[in-house]
Image (cartoon, coloured by chain):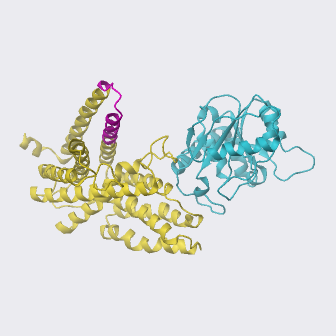
């Protein structure tokens, strides 16, 4: 079996991986569907939990499909696709952060200059610039444009919001396709596995945390921010997902111990990033970035789906590049 | 413009605009007080930007869009041939003269459209407001309600459009917008004009928080 897998070409291996992922997702979805049929008693908490789980499941479907499309159509298309995801995520973020008329030019700059430039840098593999373009250059450019708009009211607050939005939505998401374009020695054509590794361990970590949290019933560690987050189930989830990452080492350019460490880094940053985004949502007074019919804006809640990746991807990307000296 | 080509062009332009508006704003319609139904209606909404007209048009479902005519300010929307073409060929708008000219009733084109059985989109403030709250409603809504008692009056609140394109800016920014449609109101028997207009304005403002 193992030799059979090794003898396949990289693209066959990746294809097989997608067949596997979609197969597993189908099995889980069918199981969840059957469970929802069985559930006839009106237990509010239970239905709420089931809803949350199906939300997670939907995310997994969405992401797998995006990756599959990206993989079949090539790296450039994949990067553009992630650029669109960043665009819609930033649109959600800005909608729920009040801006004033004086921010208009800065917003134009963020959406139509910074965002395309960042993804263009990714496509052209200028990774040194990818990592500093937004935190260094855009960090100055945005407040300059805002200052020229001549509106000092809540200046710091407004600029901080805009820069946060750009960091999370554009900078964070742009590091996912950057992984596809990173060149490892002896790893040609297999970069899709690296993205899969990142997404898979982070998503697994979130699902395990959710399931363990239900079993343990510990009091939340930061109840005002998140009703579900507690250190015990968080730790179990991170360790479990890291070990899972170790099992997947064969897919990656890492040795097993390195894979565990990389998965650990991705899971810690991803799950804690998710917590940070929850705090942000509480600050804005909303349960979600948008649920159809519930949110005033009618946002589709894309940011809810990708927030862990937004924080996980840049840190994962940087550690990989730094450790392997790429 | 070629006569055979122009309906096709208008259709394409409509599709392009819909795509653009949905990408930038989502153009979500929230039917809270009434379902989207093909009956004769007057939709009346707050007015903060010229883009209000475009957003209302985009938020309506396809079937209603073809029987609903927005009111457009003549001086702004006929300024260039392109604007004029878009409002007539794509939006099927009704022009209203904001500057009073002689003894012509400014409601004349609206009455004509309602007599034909069309629904209309009205901004009773008359001009764009720059404030949080809508300005006082003008009498047009009352006069139309009096003259067409069978037409359903649906209040609507347009959210966020002024952030997409504030006064004086050219490039729109992507921000999610929505149109909330409330429960229809009706003119009471013998209701005073000022009372009715205040009630209509309140009905629009009540949708802000829902």
Residue A148 vertical position relative to residue A192 in the rendered view, above or below:
below
Quarter assignment of residue A33:
top left
Residue A189 visible somewhere in the drawing: no
Find chain A in the image and tell me its colour.
Answer: yellow
Q: Residue at x 34, y 67 (%)?
A: A130
A235 lies left or right of A312: left
Seen in the picture, residue A138 relative to B96 is either above or below; the reply is below
Percent from the top left, x then y, of residue A299?
47, 47
Q: Magenta residues, as a range?
A: A37-58
Nearer to me, A32 or B200: B200
Q: Residue at x 16, y 61 (%)?
A: A185
Picture quarter with the N terminus of chain B? top right
Residue B86, given in percent of the width and then of the height, sits at 68, 46
Locate residue B123 relative to residue A53 in the image: left or right.
right
Q: Is residue A123 part of the magenta span, yes or no?
A: no
Residue B83 x %, y %: 70, 51
**Which residue is rendered at x = 17% and y = 67% of the image?**
A323
Residue drawn at (73%, 51%) of the image: B77
Furthest-right residue in this view? B103
Q: Is residue A45 magenta?
A: yes
Q: Which chain is cyan?
A: B
Task: Locate the C terminus of chain B by quadrant.
Answer: top right
Can you see residue A42? yes
A254 vs A307, nearest the viewer: A307
Q: Give the prevailing secondary structure in the magenta stretch.
A: helix
Pinpoint residue A14: horizontal percent, then vertical percent.
21, 45
């Amino acid at each position: 079996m193992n030799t059979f897998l090794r003898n396949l070409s990289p693209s066959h291996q990746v294809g097989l991986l997608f067949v596997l992922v979609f197969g597993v997702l189908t099995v889980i979805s069918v199981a969840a569907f059957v469970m929802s049929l069985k559930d006839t008693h009106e237990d509010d908490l239970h239905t709420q939990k089931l809803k949350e789980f199906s939300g997670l499941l939907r995310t997994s479907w969405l992401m797998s499909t995006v990756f599959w499309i990206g993989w079949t159509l090539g790296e450039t298309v994949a990067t553009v696709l992630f650029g669109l995801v960043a665009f819609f995520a930033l649109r959600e973020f800005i909608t729920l952060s009040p801006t004033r008329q004086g921010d208009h030019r800065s917003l134009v700059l963020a959406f139509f200059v910074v965002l395309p430039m960042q993804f263009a840098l990714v496509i052209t593999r200028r990774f040194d610039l990818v990592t500093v373009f937004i935190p260094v250059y855009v960090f100055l450019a945005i407040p300059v444009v805002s200052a020229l708009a001549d509106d000092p009211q809540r200046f710091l607050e407004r600029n901080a919001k805009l820069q946060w939005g750009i960091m999370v939505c554009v900078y964070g998401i742009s590091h996912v396709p950057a992984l596809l374009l990173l060149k490892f020695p002896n790893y040609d054509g297999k970069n899709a596995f690296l993205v899969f590794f990142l997404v898979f361990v982070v998503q697994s970590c979130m699902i395990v945390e959710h399931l363990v949290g239900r079993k343990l019933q510990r009091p939340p560690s930061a109840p005002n921010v998140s009703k579900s987050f507690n250190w015990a189930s968080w730790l179990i989830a991170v360790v479990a997902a890291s070990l899972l990452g170790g099992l997947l080492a064969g897919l990656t350019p890492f040795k097993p111990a390195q894979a565990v460490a990389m998965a650990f880094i991705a899971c810690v940053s991803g799950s804690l990033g998710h917590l940070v985004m929850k705090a942000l949502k509480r600050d804005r007074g909303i349960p979600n970035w948008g649920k159809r019919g519930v949110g005033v804006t009618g946002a589709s809640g894309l940011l809810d789906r990708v927030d862990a990746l937004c924080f996980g991807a840049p840190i994962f990307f940087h550690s990989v590049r730094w450790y392997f000296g790429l | 413009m070629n006569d055979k080509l122009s309906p096709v062009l208008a259709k394409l332009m409509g599709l392009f605009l819909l795509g653009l508006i949905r990408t930038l704003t989502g153009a979500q319609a929230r039917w809270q007080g009434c379902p989207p139904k093909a009956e004769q209606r007057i939709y009346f909404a707050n007015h903060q930007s010229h883009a209000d007209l475009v957003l209302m048009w985009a938020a309506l479902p396809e079937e209603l869009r073809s029987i609903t005519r927005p009111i457009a300010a003549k001086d702004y929307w006929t300024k260039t041939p392109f604007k004029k073409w878009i409002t007539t060929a794509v939006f099927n708008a009704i022009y209203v003269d904001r500057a009073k000219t002689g003894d012509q009733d400014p409601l004349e084109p609206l009455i004509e459209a309602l007599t034909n059985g069309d629904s209309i989109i009205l901004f009773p403030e008359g001009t764009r407001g720059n404030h949080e709250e809508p300005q006082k409603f003008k009498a047009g809504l009352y006069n139309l309600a009096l003259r067409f008692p069978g037409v359903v009056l649906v209040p609507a609140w347009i959210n966020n459009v002024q952030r997409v394109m504030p006064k004086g800016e050219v490039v729109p920014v992507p921000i999610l917008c929505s149109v909330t449609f409330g429960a229809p109101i009706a003119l009471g028997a013998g209701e005073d004009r000022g009372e009715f207009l205040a009630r209509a304005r309140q009905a629009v403002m009540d949708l802000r928080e829902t």
